[in-house]
Amino acid sequence: MNYHKNHGNLKRCWGLIFCSLSILLGACTTKVVKQQDNLPIEDSTEIEVNTTVLPLPDTLYPSVERVRYDVEIKDSSDLTLSSLESLYDGEDVLTFRKTLLRDANFGGKVTGTPATIDTAWVFHTYYNTEQTKYGIWGGGSGWTGQPLFHKKRNEIMVGSLCGRVYFIDYNTGKATRQAIDVTNTIKGTPSLDPTLDNLYVGQGVPNHQPFGSLTIDLKKNQITDFFGRDPKARRGWNAFDSSPVVVGDFLFWPGENGCLYKFRRAQGKLTLAAALRYTINGSASGVENSLCVYRNYGFFGDNHGNILAVNLNTMKPVWSYNNHDDIDGSIVCKVENDTPYIYCGCEVDKQGNEGICHIVKLDGRNGNRIWNLQIPCKRFTLGEKALDGGMYCTPLLGMGDCSHLLFANICRNGADGKGAGSGEMIAVDIQTGKIVHSTQLNQFAWSSPVGFLNEKNEMYIFTGDSGGTTYLIRAKTGEILCKKHFAHNFESSPLVIGNTAIVGSRQNGIYKFVIK
């Protein structure tokens, strides 16, 4: 008997049994085969490394008592997530801020100390002059409006305020295929399915009916599925600015109708599996931000300032937290010592003309508050529009020499004594919640900042403001290295590829910038 051979077979059998049990429990196991040093190939040994990803507990904390909810189950089969592994860690950029954690980990790289922002190309969208109940929306892209990237096809995909989805060659800036007209304004960021050739697009403004969310089958280059008005929704506004994500076998998509949806996926089609509908203090609130996911917990904030954690297996709330005012920016998660911490900020909207932007760090397991940074902000009027203050962006987690920091664009709007429409980018210590430094912007910014690292692990930030100015900032100090004006308004969030940033303006331009 070859002892080594049979011993290895036994180990493999037990490994398969253990893996099967783990899957049944909603866990995921990876086996690593390692050749020990100084051993010939035939004597290599199999070392099993336990990397099991266990689900967080199925529980309800007392903070859920204020939430009145129901979960509708439309699918009689097992709705447990088949895997907790992320499908978003490759080179493609498939959703808003790239990952399930919404941490904008694009892998941006620069050489040395970058000092310039140059234009590689500008792609021009259609400019829609249709007069609607909600105004003229024009073209380009709005909030959040981040482009997506499919590396194999070298293709940029972006939804436009003009109501079309565009496909652009990353190198040349030329169209790669016919644009797709979805008839209504797109404000948010679409999402590419990680394993299917589906593009999920949410409509933002009901210029025409029907109004809702849709699936584009990229194999056919046409709309093949539409999810319209939900008669059971507790809020009538059926916009979908959120960028959905796939976890396990399901797509999760929050709506501005006050619901979180769980869909089964097939090529060109979604089928509703379950829906969470809720009210707090007797009122339903919409969700404009994108779901942040850690293991089987999903986190989002709503227009009334509520932060909810939901068990994505059961679709039931786990905990809730009152963050005082409208939350549009997406929640960001960072894991420290195996504990998921989430970061979230609010606007000054329900508070009136003056108020506080609350930026909080919470324990993602239970909603316990770690710190609360309070920043005075104002609302100001521009023409016939009232523009709220506070945080619209999704914060950026620091990396490299700034891994201890969190960056966010704040709309101060004169609360800092620097004039109506004032804005700044702040750097916050993630342990203390204290502002380390701030960078004054020409105007307020809704756009989310993005980061780059150089060969010394030094971090640099690119961001734009509502006046169409772009900034290149040394992240550690807040020093502006380059400032250039290019367009009317950059309220969209950039996509990062290498040393480039691709972002749309509120006119009709999609820009590719080179950072060097």
Image (cartoon, rainbow, N blue to C red):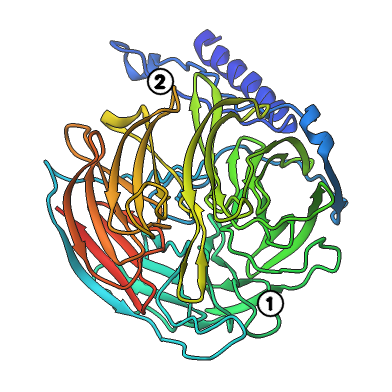
Circle 2 — which element? loop
* Circle count: 2
Q: Quadrant of the N terminus?
A: top right
Query: Which is more toward the observer, 282 or 24?
Result: 282
Q: What is the quadrant of residue 487 in the picture?
A: bottom left
Residue drawn at x 37%, y 61% is: 152
**Label 2: how many Cα within 10 Å (few below 14, some 14–19, many 20+):** few
User: At which x and y percent is residue 146?
Assistant: 43, 61
- Which mark is on residue 34? 2
Above or below residue 208? Residue 451 is above
Query: Which is more toward the observer, 263 or 362?
Result: 362
Query: Which is more toward the observer, 291 or 303?
Result: 303
Q: Amino acid at mark 1?
A: Phe
User: At which x and y percent is residue 444?
Assistant: 38, 57
**Label 1: how many Cα within 10 Å (few below 14, some 14–19, many 20+):** many
Which is more N-terminal, label 1 or label 2?
2
- Which mark is on residue 211? 1
Q: Is residue 137 visible?
A: yes
User: At which x and y percent is residue 215?
Assistant: 62, 70
Instruction: Determine the residue located farthest toward the bottom in the rendered image.
Output: 130
Above or below residue 140? Residue 278 is above
In this picture, residue 377 sits left or right of residue 499: right
In this picture, residue 333 sits left or right of residue 54: left
Circle nearer the viewer, 2 or 1: 1
- Which mark is on residue 374? none
Residue drawn at x 36%, y 52% is: 423
Q: Amino acid at mark 2?
A: Lys
In this picture, residue 241 sits left or right of residue 235: left
Query: Which is more toward the observer, 381 or 286?
Result: 381
Circle 1 — which element? loop
Q: Is residue 154 visible?
A: no
User: At which x and y percent is residue 126?
Assistant: 41, 86
